[in-house]
Amino acid sequence: MTGRQQLCRLVADKPETRDWSVMGGVVEKPVQVPAPAPAPAPTAAATVVVERALAAHPGVLEAAVVPAGDGVGVLVVLDEMSTALEVREDLRASLLAAGLEAEPAVLPVVRLPAPPLGTFEELTAEVAEPADSAGSGAAEVSRYEPPSAGPEADLAGRLAGFLGLPRVGALDDFVELGGDSLVAVAFLHAVQEAYAVPLGVVELFTAGTVRGIARLLAARPAAAPQVA
């Protein structure tokens, strides 16, 4: 038996080397491509920051922080004057102040579910209730969605400026953001100047969100943006 045959026999006899190859008398182990690393879960530091911010928030009566697939999931029982959007942005500000980039998602509930708690996605599905007699609707989770490029981004920037907010999401509700009739009039005047399309206050409150307003503009032939 030649040296090459002996080497091949040695490789074949060892279970841990059966996937190796012999090239020119040299044993080569196949390159192992590492599997993609899973998305990092919210760190313990983020959870601590969120829990402290919730405890200090005057409008949060009860709260629970749970694992979420893409950020920090929070269930809250709120008083009548607070909104999930307000809590979400307060939590984000606390996380940024601590040097953390995690995005919180907030689900308001009437009461916290009994432990053990599952993931945020599981809990969202569990508390979903029928929206009306015609069917069921998903629970109203307050989750930030960036506005898309173009009119959405422009409108979101303008609205954030009028409201004195660092950002406005595409699906954030105008009223929950703190908008009132005075802000609505000023904002709509700016929109009319930029897009040459008149919109009424009732239309703004009905549309509710930046995405809704952008769709109103897009549905009108005269909606020709005059923004850079």
Image (cartoon, rainbow, N blue to C red):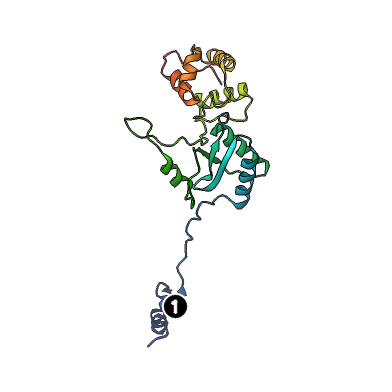
Under circle 1, the secondary element is loop
At x 53% / y 31%, what residue is drawn?
Answer: 169
Question: Residue 71: image x %, image y %?
Answer: 54, 45
Residue 11, picture quadrant: bottom left
In this view, the residue farthest toward the right is 97
Q: Residue at x 58, y 22 (%)?
A: 158
Which quadrant does the C terminus fall into? Answer: top right
19 lies above or below 123: below
**68 left or right, relative to 98:** left
**Which is more toward the observer, 191 or 62?**
62
How many marks overall? 1
Q: Is residue 224 visible?
A: no
Q: Position of residue 132 (x, y in %)?
A: 36, 30
Query: Crowding at label 1, few (<14), some or many (≥20) Cα neighbours within 10 Å?
Result: few
Identified by mark 1, the residue type is Gly
Counting from the top left corner in percent of width and height, residue 142 is at 51, 35
Q: Residue 159 at x, y = what percent?
A: 57, 23
Location of the N terminus by quadrant is: bottom left
Report whether residue 176 is seen.
yes
- Quadrant of res 64: top right
Residue that badge 1 annotates: 25
Pick out the residue farthest to the left.
Answer: 134
